[in-house]
Image (cartoon, rainbow, N blue to C red):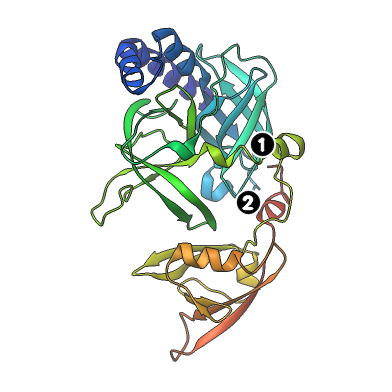
Amino acid sequence: MMISAIKGRAARFSGFVAAGLAGAGTLVATAAAAPLTAADVDKILDAVVGIATEVPADARSAESLGRERIGTGVAIDGNGLVLTIGYLLLEASAASVFGPDGRAVPANVVAYDHETGFGLLRTVLPLEVSPIALGRSGDLKTGDTVLALGRTGSSPLVPQKVVDRRAFAGYWEYLIDDAIFTAPPIPGFGGAALIGADGKLLGIGSLFVGDAGPGSLPVPGNMFVPIDLLKPILADLLADGRRTGPAQPWLGLYTGEAAGRVFVQRVVAGGPAEAAGVKPGDIIMGVGGQSVAGLIDFMRKVRAQGGAGIDVPVDVLSADAADAKIARRVIHSRDRLDWMKKKSGF
């Protein structure tokens, strides 16, 4: 079912591109110093591929992310290396890549990086597409026109504007600086390619968000992981499957934020926070005696304690306490990727 679904979506994508190629070429060319030709746009579209992965039933991420995952990837070299968003391949036992002809090509998981969210696959056979060059996401500014390309969803090609650049913290203990926020949203955002005016890759799609814009009014859009975050770690990922150096401390928490307060939505079963007595509903007031103001601040203060394996003193207002006394829970952090790999691969 998964393979046929991808093939059907790939066929619809090809039809959409055939009908809108001229418009897409014009969009990209108008802002570029050296306008892209229709042939250039064709190559870019061909290099945006479909991805399908399967995950074992006992994988730790199976319940939250599903056992069958589909999304998009981008060919970034001539030897079948495909960049995508990591949650598509986390703990995957099998993976396939679908090129412009809809043909399924088996692929191996190469790497996963929790800190950025990037994942890498390599096909076992050539894709026979021209890779997309990596651009400079640091040069991307609010108001710039970009093109989002995906292989899933009802609108696989969406002209977008960059509506903000800012730090982003995810409830799954994820934090990046200078994330790219775009609007209007592309429905098939998972692994979607963000293409700049010069035809180069500027980011990989991660999420749909309701607050893409900088103001208080809701602006639906997408969050893209900047491609500049890949460049310093790419050699490590290709050599070892992960970045070198100390990992960030992982607590096993899923958190939310309301009015600047961070609260625990749930704890990972068997994870560090559960072992320390942290419970859903607890309000996180501080780290090591320093108050926290929002999820980004909380994540930064946790990481300032040191690398994975350290004890993180978290000050909480317990959900089941009879009074308003703040209690300290000392969480012995772990490396999230090592914890994941207890059951299966990346």
Which residue sits at x=42%, y=67%?
A: 294
Identified by mark 1, the residue type is Leu
| Front in this rendered view, residue 51 or 168 | 168
Q: Residue 11 location in percent, x, y? A: 42, 15
Q: Classify mark 1: helix, strand or loop.
A: helix
Q: CA distance from mark 1 to mark 2?
A: 26 Å
**In-image side of 30 versus 338 (left or right):** left
Determine which quarter of the picture holds residue 37. Answer: top left
Q: Classify mark 2: helix, strand or loop.
A: loop
What residue did someone put label 2 on? 60
Question: What's the mark number on residue 234?
Answer: 1
**In-image side of 314 versus 28 (left or right):** right
Q: Residue 140 location in percent, x, y? A: 42, 37
Q: Residue furthest right?
A: 239
| Front in this rendered view, residue 194 or 278 | 194
Identified by mark 2, the residue type is Arg
Determine which quarter of the picture holds residue 54. Answer: top right
Marks 1, 2: nearer the viewer: 1
Label 2, residues with CA under 10 Å away: few <14, some 14-19, many ≥20: many
Label 1, residues with CA under 10 Å away: few <14, some 14-19, many ≥20: some
Q: Is residue 218 visible?
A: yes
Which residue sits at x=45%, y=46%?
A: 179
Q: Is residue 191 above or below residue 270?
A: above
Which residue sits at x=57%, y=42%?
A: 229
Q: Is residue 67 visible?
A: no
